Image: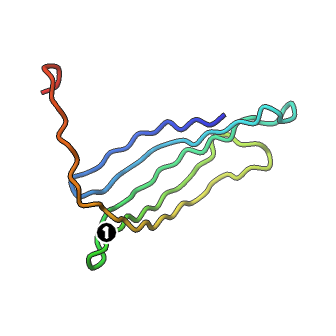
Amino acid sequence: MFLQPFLAYTTKTHTTFTLDMESTTNWNNTPGDAKWTIPVIFQISQILKIRKQPISIQIGGKYYADTPHYGPNWGVRFNFILLYPTGKHPEPVERTGLVK
């Protein structure tokens, strides 16, 4: 089983702060050993341009709240993503009386 709850906040300057978990379980682990691997991940990402090429860079850290005896205690995540926007603008969302 895989669970990934997350919370993300993006600023006006296209910086995103994310807190999430990528939890997995192994139901066949031996008794007494943790069945879950639960990393708590905090990462920051930024969208910017190098010349005309938009990119996203990300850095994050992982703390493992629960892991089997052979699992890690911490981790680091780095990402560099080239973005290729289509140039199309999204359709406006129709507002109802419930949203103002």
Residue 52 place in picture, x, y as percent: 26, 76
The residue shown at (84%, 32%) is: 32
Tag 1 residue: 54
The residue shown at (83%, 33%) is: 28
Farthest-out residue, right: 30
The residue shown at (27%, 57%) is: 14
Residue 46 place in picture, x, y as percent: 34, 61
Viewer-closest of 51 and 71:
51
- Horizontal relation, residue 40 to residue 53: left or right: right
Occupied quadrant, residue 38:
top right
State whether residue 77 is above or below residue 41: below
Residue 58 place in picture, x, y as percent: 43, 62
Give the crowd class for mark 1: few <14, some 14-19, many >=20 residues within 10 Å: some
State whether residue 94 is above or below residue 75: above
Please tell me whether mark 1 sits on a helix, a strand or a loop.
strand
Q: Amino acid at mark 1?
A: Pro
Looking at the image, what colour scheme do you see?
Answer: rainbow
The image quadrant where one finds the N terminus is top right
Viewer-closest of 60 and 85:
85
The residue shown at (17%, 20%) is: 98
Residue 99 place in picture, x, y as percent: 16, 25
State whether residue 52 is above or below residue 15: below
Occupied quadrant, residue 40:
top right
The image quadrant where one finds the C terminus is top left
Viewer-closest of 47 and 65:
47
